[in-house]
Structures are given as structure tokens and as C-alpha cells.
Image (cartoon, grey):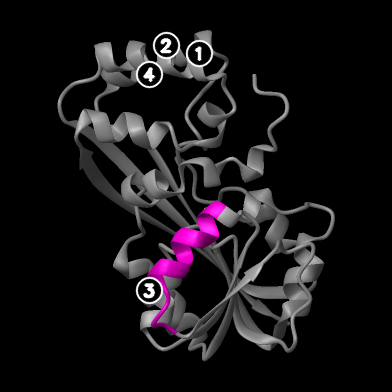
Amino acid sequence: MAGDKVRALTFGEVAEEYDRVRPGYPPELFEAVLAYSSPATALEIGAGTGKATIVFASGGVRVVALEPDPGMALVLRQHVASLPVTIAMGSLESYEPEEPVDLVYSAQAFHWTSPATRWARTAAALRPGGSLALFWNIERLADSEERRQVETILSEYELKWPGEWPESDHLEPYAEMAELPEFGELRQEIYRWQRTLATADYLAHLGTQSAYLMLEDEERDELLDRLRAVLPEPVTLEMATILYLAKRV
């Protein structure tokens, strides 16, 4: 492993590739968030290259986009230059909002925040009655035999699929959120869809994930070559996008 790397700050190394091959989110998700919150202002935690930022800002929401990685922020800035977006270099732990917002949201990034402070800091950034929206994509190969072969290879590198495939009704962090006194009206939605990629693009997509970025270059190249040998052309993924919504009490 590349022990001198900070895992949460590896994405900037591959920011343009991340922007090119990472998936977005179902339109129904954004419709649900906007219907739930009707926001004029929002704070985004971990904006990345702006896959969610662009959608909310294009709908007229004024977004403060937090992003700690300069490489990711550079691509983000190119995407939102004409939109009502203010980019703030930093993390949830370091940012002090000037005023509360209508919506705090995080796309594929909330797990990088500090468990000790994230709920209190998120609540403090919201006006009373404001909304919290957290969402993640989880994926797996659609074909079970392909999945088995890949899992066997990944296990040799002490890797696994990112995120548990959702089989139950209530997933993490649902139970934790349900116990928070700062939030109420909790909802969870799961959007299921498929994504088809050229094999080269799928391998590039894997190469933008933090677990792969933490490998030494030679080891990562070896792993991707082994995966290439067992994957079909193209690759079809099952996708599950999980959305959590809650109101600030």
C-alpha cells in the first residue's frame, strides 16, 4: 500500500478521469430532493467534480460547494463557472457557514466526514426546518459468474466491492439517523438501474476508487490486467442509488 497517501485526498490524482467515467445519479433522485426541501440555498459536502452540483445549481439553487482536494476543485470550477455556485476549499470539519441554508447534501462523500462531529456540524449548517440529503451509488457486475470471478481476484488483493449491495429495507446510516435528536421525518429511497460501459472505461472507473488508488502503481496495473482478462466487452453493471432525507428539527 502507498502508506504516505491520505485516502480521502487521492481522487485529485485522477480528477479528469473521475469526471469522465464515474456515474451520475438518477433524475428521480434530484426530483425527490427538490420536492422534499424546495431549497433556495444549499451546502454541498464533498462536491468532487460536480456531478450533483451541476444539477442542483442548474435548477436555480445557490450552492456553496465544499471540496478539500485542489485537483477535484479545478475540474469542478470549469463545470460551474456560469452557475450560482461558490466553491469553498475545505471540509465539513473546517468550514464555518456564514448563514444557515435550506439544504445540506452530500453525494458519494459523507462517509469521508468525521463520525464524531458530522451530525452536529450538519445540523448547525441548516436552518430550522431545512433538509438533509445524503446519497450514494452502489454497483456490482450484473452477471453472477463474472461477479464471482472478479470477487476471487479482488480477495487476493484484500479488496471487495465498495458498499454492501442493498437487500434490506433499511440500510446504514438509517438506524443512526433515526436516533438523532436534531433530525426528523426520515425517509429512505433506493433507485435501481443499469449502466453499460466499455471494458476499458470500467477499468478506468475502478482506477478512480480510493482502494485502487491506495495500491502501488505496479500492483494496481497487475490487478487491472487480471480483471481485464476475465471481463466481457462491454461490462454491464447493476446500480443501486440510495437516498436518505431528513428534516432539521
Q: CA separation, marks 4 and 2?
A: 6 Å
Question: Disc 3 marks which residue?
Answer: 55
Left or right relative to 241: residue 5: right
Marks 4/2 in contact by CB < 8 Å: the verdict is yes
Q: Position of residue 233 (x, y in %)?
A: 15, 25
> For the magenta stretch, what is the residue range?
71-83
Q: Nearer the viewer, residue 73 or 205?
A: 73
Marks 1/2 in contact by CB < 8 Å: the verdict is yes
Q: CA separation, marks 3 and 2?
A: 37 Å
Q: CA separation, marks 4 and 1?
A: 9 Å
Question: Disc 4 marks which residue?
Answer: 224
Q: Identify the mark nearer the N-term, 1 or 3.
A: 3
> What is the quadrant of the C terminus in the image?
bottom right
Type of amino acid at the residue the image marks with label 3? Val
Dominant secondary-structure state across the stretch colored magenta: helix
Determine which of the numbered discs, if any, sits on residue 222 in the image. 2
